[in-house]
Every structure is written in structure tokens, then in C-alpha cells.
Image (cartoon, rainbow, N blue to C red):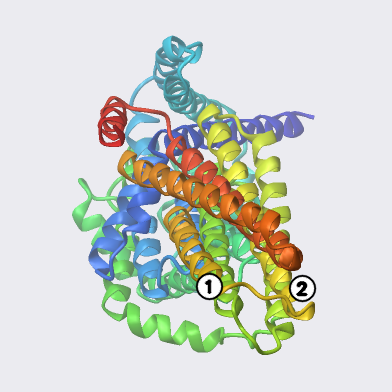
Amino acid sequence: MNALIGAIRIIGSVGLFLYGMKLMSDGLQKSAGSKLKSILKAMTANRFMAVLTGTLLTMVIQSSSAVTVMVVSFVSASLMTLSQSIGVILGANIGTTITSWIVSLLGFEMDITILALASVALSLPFLFSKKPKRREISEIFLGFGFLFLGLNFLQRSMPNVGDHPEILSFLQSFNNSSIISLLICVLVGALITCIVQASAATMAITITMAYQGWIGIWSAAALCLGQNIGTTITAFVASLSTGTNGKRAALAHTLFNVVGSVLALIFFKPLINLVNLITPGNIFLSQGEALNKELPIFLSMFHTVFNLINTLLFLPFTTQFARLIEKMIPEKEKFDDGTYHFRYIGNSRVDTPEIYLIQVKEEIDKMGALTRNMFQKYMAMCFKTSDISEDIEVLKKDEDYADQMQEQLIDFCVRMLQDSQSPTNASTLQKLIRIIDETESITDSIFNMAKLNETKRKDDLHFSEEAKAELKTFNELTYSFVEEVTNRIGERMNARDMTISQNLERDINDKHRELRATGQNNLMTESENVKSDLLYLEIIRHLEHIGDFCLNIAETRFALQKHTPSLIQEEKKAKEVAR
């Protein structure tokens, strides 16, 4: 019974620690938000900057899993090359060591309950604020509080060494430098990390056990290596729903940690001696309580040195490493069945809209490119005298594809909207849904105009040369508006671009009124061309509708983010320009 209660206490402590980690990570990601995305999207081919970016981001958001999954997402969306992703992953492994240092430096040398209560107290002024940013700050402090509280409970839940000599004797049998013992400890560390999907939690358990005297130098260090292998399960699970590039990024993460751990096992004693050399004191001369107190710092240093050396070994060969992975996971032959499948990155430990929003916006950009392509195809076949049935068939497939994109993306956005805890994300999602709807409406109008041209040819209807010239001008004017609003359609539009959009919509309305008046006049004076004139009026009506859809997209893009003082100034300037 006592054993069961002890196990429940340990599991509960780990659960509280994990919850604190997740709450803190989510709060930091929400606060950083667009900055995280812009940093990763602006990643250059410089491998050193990639490593630095991965390190800093992981230190900031306190989750290598979140950064790794984000990298897999970006590689899958072709926003980052495989070589760049390797650099970021290397950096993320360095950045994740900060958690072990927090545990080692703060978890044992002072009353951690004070830190927990202080963090919770600091969260209170922000917790009930109406402003989302302040509530996100409260999540960060609450996360720290639960993390420290979980660590405190974990220390207290760990059984006393003296009360269980038989268990201690069993564990001590693995505390040697034999390859069998080290391999068992590595496997145990990897297995536990795979189960909890958080190397930080496993590291905290290892450090606590070492501090309490349950494990020694060799077994604790080997457990650290196992944790580095186990943490790759997060990226692996996330990559299952991605294409070839995403799977390659996940494999890069796995190979890096596995190969690095194997090399560390081969040179285990020299590595331990190196860490002992740069860590204050001498771990081999300490015994009893003195050893237990020195082990947390030693393990944190071991964790950091291992990842630094691993990075230095792999960094010069990132290009060659990327080529090897490309050979291991070759590009699959693509079978285009004309259907759309939205692949998103999902993971039980890293489930934040900040990552998903990046992917949705990229898909919306693809939808914008599809719309422009459809309009170009329509203009190319608009005045054809030859058979256009094949052109119509191609546009029909494009329009069906756009319908599928609309259905799947909106369905995903609605599900995100239902789960969203952030008003900022909820507002962004609502606007993205509006953009998707308006874009799909443009593709409908383009296809309808193509069908009208097919009717014109089948019924042997003709427009005058003047009408053709006017329609060509109207087509080009409308396309320029489509191009303006669908370029980087998932991103915010500034005040200057908004003014351009308003001017284009006004020009389209003026042109529509002019051509409609001409067409209606022709209806009253030329009774023999009634069907041609009606069809002409229907085409220009669709063009005017496209102008309306484009303006709706522009206004929604302009409102994508909450206004700031600088943006208000931009709006004032825009109004002055409009006057």
C-alpha cells in the first residue's frame, strides 16, 4: 500500500511539473507569437545563425519540442530548407539544457516553495486583466509556479535511501562504467522520455534521484543520454502527418541525437572526465551527501557539454548530412488525383495555435496563387475562336480544388476557434475564415465567366470590336486588383496598400457603370443582338463582383492585427492621400 501511495505521489509530482512546463511554454509562445514566426521565416542559409536561433527560441519558450515541431512544419511547407532545419534543431538541443540548470541551481539550494508561491503571487495582478497580453504573462508566472511546486513535491515524494537498502543495492549495481549497465540506463532514460514526451521532466527526475542518492555518476549521465534519444519521439509523431520534407526533418533530429549518444557512449569516460574538469570541485573525490549535492550541477554541465560537442561535430557537415537524409527518405512519386489534402502538424505535447496559424496562412497563400492562375487562364481563353472545352475542363478542376481548400481550411479553422484560449488568435482565425470565403467566391466568379464564354461560342454569339477592347481592359483592371490582394494573402495589409485597393475598387465600379450603361443602351437600340448584350452584361457583373470580393479581402487583411498608434497614423495618412 505504501509503495502504491509513493508511486502516485511521484506520478502526480511529475504531472504537476509537466503542466507547469506546458502552461509556461504556451504563455511564452502566445506572448512571443508573431515574433517567433517572423524569426523562423526569416531564417537564412547561415548555419551559425540557424543554431543561434534554435538555441535562443528554445531558451525563450522553454520547449525544444515546440521549436522542433515548428521546424518540421516549416520544412514540410517548404519555408525552410532541410539544411537550415538541421541548424535550428542543433540549437534547440542546446537551448533545452536551460531547464536542467534551473532545476539544479534553484531546486535544491533554496526553499523552492517560496519560488513557487512568489511566481503564483506575481501572476495574480495579470490573471484577471481584460487585456489578453497580460493574461498571457500570468500564464508564464503560473507555469513557473506549478513547475517549482511539482519539483518540490517530487523531492519530497522520493523515498528515503536508508529505508530501502535493497532497492538502493539494486540500483547501485548499474552505477558503473560497464557497457551493459550504461546501455540499460540509456534505454530506461529513452523509454521514460518517450512515455512523458518531455525530456525536461525526465531530466528533473534524474537530477532529483541523483540528489537523493538513488543513482550515481555513471547511471545518471547515461540516463541523460537516453533522454536525448527519447525526446525525438515528439518530432517523429508530428512528422507522421506531413509529407516527405517533414519526415526528413524529423529523421534529422532523430539521427543527430542517436548518433551523438552512441559517440558519447564510445567516449564515455573521456567525456565524464572533461565535464569533471570544467565543473567546480571533483566529482570522483566527493562521497555521501557532498556527492549528492554536487551531482545536479555536474549533470547539468554534462547535458550542456554533450549537446555543445554534438553540435560542433555535426555543424560543419549539415549539407552532407542533409544529402544523406534525402537519400534515406527519397522523394515519393507524386500522383496528382486533383484532390486537396490539408496536412497539419499535430502533437499531444505541442498543441498551440501559434504553429497552426503559420500553416493555415501558407495554405491561404497557395489559394491566392491558384486564384491568380485561374484568372490568367480565363483571360487567355476569353476571346478564343477555337474550341475551349479543354480550357473549361481545366478551370473546372481548379474551381473544385478551390472548393476543397475552402472546406478543409475552414473546418480546421473552426476547430481551432473552438479550442482557442486566446482572443487574439480567435480574432485572427475569424478573419482568415472570411478571407478564405471571399477568395473562393472569386474562383466561382472566374469559372462562371468561363462558362459564359463557352455559351457564347456554342450559341455563335459575337461582341463588337469596341466591346471586346473594353472587356479586355476591364479584365486587366480586375486582375490587377486580384493580384494586389492575393499576393501574400495570409499577411496583414498596410495603410498604403489599403488605399491602392480602395482606388482599384472605385475604378472597377466606375468601369462597370460605364459598360453597363453602354450594354443597356444597346439592348434598347439593337434588338438583333439581345443574347450577346445580356451575356456581356452578365460577364461585367461578375467582374464587378470580383472587385467587391477583393475589397472585402483587403479590408479583412488590413484588420488582421489589432491597431497600434503607428497604424492609426498610417490610416490618417491614407485618408489624406484618398482626399
The amino acid sitting under disc 1 is: Gln
Q: Taking 143 as reference, is 269 left or right? A: left
Q: Residue at x 54, y 71 (%)?
A: 468
Quarter of the figure that contains the N terminus: top right
**How far across and down, in percent of the image, does residue 62 sit?**
42, 42
Q: Residue at x 51, y 11 (%)?
A: 128
Say whether disc 1 or disc 2 marks the residue closer to the N-terminus.
Answer: 1
- Determine the residue positioned at 50% across, 65% down: 470
* Kind of element beneath mark 1: helix
Q: Nearer the viewer, mark 1 or mark 2?
A: 2
Q: Nearer the viewer, residue 214 or 47?
A: 47
Quadrant location of residue 573?
A: top left
Residue 459: which quarter of the image? bottom right
Q: Position of residue 356 (x, y in %)?
A: 56, 49
**Residue 11 left/right relative to 204:** right
Which residue is nearer to you in this view: 136 or 110? 136
Q: Does residue 327 appear in the picture of this structure? A: yes
- CA gap between label 1 and label 2 equals 19 Å
Q: Nearer the viewer, residue 43 or 248?
A: 43
Q: Name the quarter where the C terminus is drawn.
A: top left
Q: Which mark is residue 348?
A: none
The residue under label 1 is 376
Image spot of residue 570 (x, y percent): 27, 33
Percent coordinates x, y for residue 48 in the rendering? 23, 65
Task: Evaluate whether residue 162 shows in this view.
Answer: no
Check disc 2 and report the residue beneath it.
455
Instruction: Name the amino acid type tagged 2.
Output: Thr
